[in-house]
Amino acid sequence: MQRKSFVLVGLCALFLVSGCGQDGTGVSLLEESASTERRLPADLYGAAVKPDSAQFLAEHEGVSYFLGRPTDPGMANGVCLVAMEAESTGCSGPSSDPTRLATLDVLGTEARVVRDGADVTDLGNDGWTQVHENLLVR
C-alpha cells in the first residue's frame, strides 16, 4: 500500500512540475483579467486570437508583444503570440516543451513563449534574451 502512495505522490509532482495546470498552458498571465490598457486592439489579430484574451507581455526594440488564446478548437490549451507593430501572429497548440509554447519571427527577431518558471539558462547561451517571464527574443 505504501508503494502505491509513493507512485501517486510522484505522479502528482510530475504534473505540477510539468506546468500542467487547469488551463494546460502553464502561463498564469492567461488566467488574469486584462485591464483595457493591457489589451490588444481586436482589429490587429483578426480571427486567430480569442477576443479579450490577448494581454501585454513586453516591449522589445519597438515591438509590443501580446499573449492570447487561439480561437481554433483544435488548439485548445495552446497560446498565440502577437507582435502588434508588425501585425504578426503565431499560434500553437499545447506543447510538452516548457521552453517552446509558441514562436514568431518578426522583423528579423525571433520570439518564443515559455511556461512560468521554465529554466531558460541554456537558451541564454544560444543568444536568447528573456524580456518577460514568458517571453524570450533573439
Image (cartoon, rainbow, N blue to C red):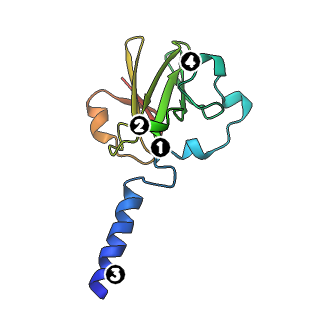
- Left or right relative to 123: residue 37: right
Instruction: Please state the horizontal and vertical placement of residue 91, each as a whole percent of the image.
Output: 45, 29
Which quadrant is home to the N terminus?
bottom left
Indicate the amino acid at tag 2: Gly
Which is more N-terminal, label 2 or label 1? Answer: 1
What residue did someone put label 2 on? 93
User: Which of the labelled discs sits on residue 77, or is there none?
Assistant: 1
Instruction: Please state the horizontal and vertical placement of residue 47, each as a whole percent of the image.
Output: 57, 23
Picture quadrant of residue 75 = top left
For residue 105, above or below residue 33: above
Q: Residues within 10 Å of mark 2 (few under 14, many from 20)?
A: some
Indicate the amino acid at tag 4: Met
What residue did someone put label 3 on? 5
- Judging from the image, what secondary structure is the residue with disc 1 in? loop
Which of labels 4 and 2 is toward the front? 2
What residue did someone put label 4 on? 84
Q: Residues within 10 Å of mark 1 (few under 14, many from 20)?
A: some
Cα separation, mark 4 vs mark 1, equals: 22 Å
Identify the residue at horizontal 31%, vertical 33% (top origin): 124
Which of labels 3 and 4 is toward the front? 3
Which quadrant is home to the C terminus?
top left
Cα separation, mark 3 vs mark 4, equals: 49 Å
For residue 35, above or below residue 14: above
Q: Nearer the viewer, residue 135 or 30?
A: 30
The reply to whether dot 1 and dot 2 touch (C-beta < 8 Å) is yes
Cα separation, mark 4 vs mark 2, equals: 21 Å
- Judging from the image, what secondary structure is the residue with disc 2 in? loop
- Judging from the image, what secondary structure is the residue with disc 4 in? loop
